[in-house]
Image (cartoon, rainbow, N blue to C red):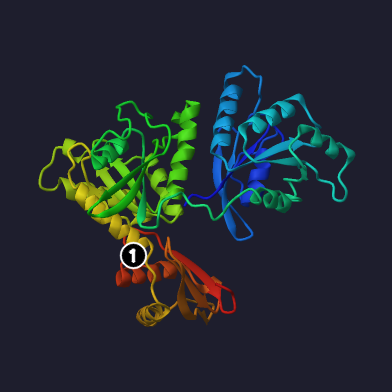
Amino acid sequence: MAKPLIAIVGRPNVGKSTLFNKLVGQRISIVEDTPGVTRDRIYFECEWRNKKVMLVDTGGIEPHSDDAILSQMRRQAQLAIEAADVIVLVVDIQSGVTANDQDVAAMLLKSGKPVVLCVNKSDRLGAPSPEFYEFYNLGLGDPIAVSSTHGHGTGDLLDACFEYIDFEKTDGYDEEYVKVAVIGKPNVGKSSLINRIAGEERVIVSDVAGTTRDATDTVIENRFGKYVFIDTAGIRRKSRVEEQIERYSVLRAYMAVDRSQVCVIMIDATVGFTEQDSKVAGYAHEQGKGCIIAVNKWDAVEKDGKTMQEFRKRLENDFSFMAYAPFIFISAKTGQRLEKLFELINYVNEQNAMRISTGRLNDLLSYATARVQPPTDKGKRLKIYYCTQASTRPPAFVFFCNKKELFHFSYQRYLENQIRETFGLEGTPIKIIVRERGDKV
């Protein structure tokens, strides 16, 4: 299920990107004391009170500007507002209420979405200054004083946002449906694949890159099971993203990955691997999704007896960061190996949801540590007491040891390989968590 989305909006230079970075705990958005620095929306996960949401940072809204870039940023922000569950309007206490603030507030009221008013740059502790109260004039309810630089008030801000979010809400599909996101660069045949599977023209198919603007759902029921295929607009290089709608498509594609259980990463066989393919796959990998690499347009490739083997070897090198992902060579145009694709989707989905008993894990741990001794440092040896599985999707394994610092990355990789060799887990990333004895899982 996709996480709820909170959009951070406001006029330029009120501190939206600084607030975004503070909430996600990393320096993701570019921060510069110049209006208009943030031109692309940034999309990142935020956790508060053991609940996760996605934040999207937007460029500043200039309601009446004719400048091409500023008007494009305004359009992007409007599109982010349409997708959001809650909107945070950021204003600047040092500037007071401006005409642009009033125009943006009026636009948000028309959207009908819940709005939380964030009065930023309230750096002074204690009672708010008299200027704080004039923001009630925007008609958005109680303002919340926040210092995005120091972090004051950010918890109150998230609490106010969470009041409007139903974390129990589902996307309307039963658990028996496998949700599959079809992702990749523009024009690799994502829509053609779904149309072939559905047996009808469910999605617009065109040779013009970027035809699919939104993520669209196609429900399929066949002898292999029940599926929801989510077709997405292609994710392309940032430098190539010129149209404001294309920028929005990138966000929709990432949101489709969040909603999915399995990602089919499509590669164009006539073009081969590109850097952008690794970025598309990298997002699915980071989100812990089951992954399949589908090489499309295989019918258009001239072949001899070694073509597939050589192509596979090159892809294994290109996708070395996700060596667990299986490859399949298909043709959306002719239907080649599409039945095999369904079998692979089912298999990868099961692997991504696999749960292994603590007893079996610790039997493996005893064998693995006897076979290769844990590392030592300055006379101290790593001791691993036991292992347990904390969660699925992706499978996450917690190892309890005497000293985290001794648990070297190379030994973690060794144990991950041992888990894969014993239990399979093909097509899914594995998360390794190291705890010292006494820590909570």
Compared with 402, 347 (above or below) is: above
Q: Residue at x 50, y 68 (%)?
A: 433
Q: Residues within 10 Å of mark 1 (few under 14, many from 20)?
A: many
Is 213 on the left or on the right of 307, as rendered?
right
Callout 1, which amino acid?
A: Leu
Residue in the foreground of this view, choosing between 94 and 102: 102
Is 60 on the left or on the right of 168, as rendered?
right
Which SS class for mark 1? loop
Q: Report which quarter residue 240 is drawn in.
A: top left
Is 167 on the left or on the right of 208, as rendered?
right
Compared with 306, 414 (above or below) is: below
Residue in the foreground of this view, choosing between 140 and 36: 140
User: Could you tell me residue 362's position as x and y percent?
Assistant: 41, 80
User: Could you tell me residue 335's position as x and y percent?
Assistant: 18, 42
Q: Would you say residue 12 is visible in this rendering?
A: no
User: Could you tell me residue 220's position as x and y percent?
Assistant: 30, 46
Q: Would you say residue 17 is visible in this rendering?
A: yes
Q: Report which quarter residue 58 is drawn in.
A: top right
Residue placed furthest toward the top: 66
Q: Residue at x 55, y 79 (%)?
A: 402
Quarter placement of the C terminus: bottom right
**Mark 1 = which residue?**
425
Total numbered badges shown on the rendered structure: 1
Q: Residue at x 31, y 61 (%)?
A: 426
Compared with 227, 113 (above or below) is: above
Q: Residue at x 39, y 36 (%)?
A: 234
